Image: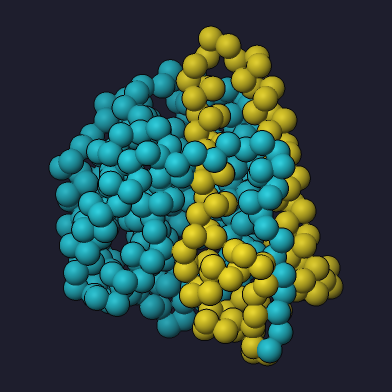
Chain colours: A yellow, B cyan
């Protein structure tokens, strides 16, 4: 999504990041809407409710986890978690050596 | 030097009242998991440090907040293996291929151990997907060829394999929105299998057909996939940049026709 936004839609990297974030928010809103609908109508179907709860746990757990280690934000992940800024050099590599942009 | 700003994704969830729970056993079992991880990748000290830093134990503590330590350890092992296979596959697709040193040799014994511990020995319809009997055959083939892509190996491998299971589980993350809509069950079946194993319960056969679950699963995969895209690691880029948008890079298997 992000690279297609950068290349195909003429976005800057920042605009593509913002666009991706909006898409995540949209899907999260849709999830909560459908989740509430399911839990309200699926009484008696404990399995379905249990699976829906597990999905919510996984979303919440995963999103929080990416801020808690080096896998996605490198060695400076604590700064990213706190301030949100990611620094890259002009070649598209982040300052911890991981590339971030393919535009 | 340039920069970009990522607005905190956690705020999206908190504003929408997503629950965040941490498994109360997290601290106690973390040492057990780290010990297993060190034993698992003992041939490569650098990779032990790298993988310890990923904190898969924490991920599973957050995603499975109510299970007991034995289940937590099991799902953490599967999680670590999944990421390892994922990373290994991605590196193998690079040009030239970059299979990590000791990749297959370390996966093989770990997978044996998981099999013996019963992670994949469930008897339900979903759990049967996890039968790993052909994993070692696949692993040997990979070790022999070193560079052959998993897609090319799959037709020669009968039955369900661990790699195929992992591939299906991860496939939604590599599909475009349009393709994903046509394969609403792809990955959900494997997710149900994981839950059955993790929570030690058996789901009804009809569960896969509960429409709202397919919708929720699509939302789940998109959120997880896109949250990774915001900060892309080199390992994703060397796979070809647009890989995850153009189609699954793992073995692509349709959901069985009987579900």
In the rendering, at what x and y percent does residue B124 appear? 32, 25
Viewer-closest of B3 and B239: B3
Q: Do we see residue B35 in this rendering?
A: yes
Going 69% across and 65% down the picture, which residue do you hit?
A: B6
In the rendering, at what x and y percent does residue B219 appear? 64, 41
User: Quadrant where the N terminus of chain A lies?
Assistant: bottom right
Q: Do we see residue A8 in this rendering?
A: no
* Residue B179 relative to residue B88: left or right: right
Going 59% across and 81% down the picture, which residue do you hit?
A: A94
B143 lies above or below B227: below
In the rendering, at what x and y percent does residue B197 appear? 33, 33
User: Quadrant where the C terminus of chain A lies?
Assistant: bottom right
B35 lies above or below B158: below
* Residue B3 relative to residue B234: left or right: right
B3 lies above or below A83: below
In the rendering, at what x and y percent does residue A83 appear? 66, 68
Going 30% across and 52% down the picture, which residue do you hit?
A: B30
């Amino acid at each position: 999504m992000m690279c297609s936004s950068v290349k195909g839609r003429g976005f800057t990297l920042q605009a593509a990041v913002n666009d991706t974030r909006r898409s995540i928010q949209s899907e999260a809103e849709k999830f909560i809407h459908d989740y509430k609908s399911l839990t309200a109508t699926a009484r008696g179907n404990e399995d379905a409710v249990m699976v829906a709860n597990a999905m919510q746990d996984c979303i919440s757990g995963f999103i929080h986890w990416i801020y808690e280690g080096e896998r996605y934000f490198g060695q400076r992940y604590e700064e990213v978690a706190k301030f949100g800024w990611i620094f890259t050099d002009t070649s598209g590599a982040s300052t911890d050596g991981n590339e971030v942009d393919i535009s | 030097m340039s920069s970009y700003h990522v607005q905190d994704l956690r705020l999206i969830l908190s504003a929408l009242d997503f629950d965040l729970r941490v498994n109360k056993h997290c601290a106690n079992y973390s040492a057990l998991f780290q010990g297993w991880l060190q034993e698992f990748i003992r041939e490569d000290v650098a990779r032990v440090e790298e993988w310890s830093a990923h904190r898969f134990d924490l991920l599973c503590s957050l995603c499975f907040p109510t299970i007991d330590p034995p289940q937590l350890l099991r799902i953490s092992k599967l999680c670590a293996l999944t990421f390892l296979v994922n990373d290994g596959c991605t590196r193998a697709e690079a040009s030239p291929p970059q299979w990590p040193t000791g990749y297959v040799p370390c996966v093989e014994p770990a997978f044996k151990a998981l099999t013996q511990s019963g992670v994949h020995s469930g008897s339900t319809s979903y759990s049967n997907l996890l039968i790993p009997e052909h994993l070692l055959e696949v692993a040997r083939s990979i070790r022999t060829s070193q560079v052959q892509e998993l897609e090319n190996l799959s037709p020669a491998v009968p039955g369900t394999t661990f790699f195929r299971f992992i591939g299906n589980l991860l496939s939604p993350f590599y599909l475009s929105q349009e393709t994903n809509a046509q394969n609403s069950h792809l990955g959900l079946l494997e997710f149900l299998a994981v839950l059955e194993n993790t929570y030690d319960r058996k789901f009804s056969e009809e569960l896969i057909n509960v429409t709202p679950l397919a919708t929720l699963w699509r939302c789940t995969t998109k959120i997880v996939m896109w949250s990774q895209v915001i900060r892309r690691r080199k390992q994703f880029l060397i796979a070809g940049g647009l890989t995850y948008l153009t189609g699954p890079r793992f073995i692509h298997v349709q959901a069985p026709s009987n579900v």
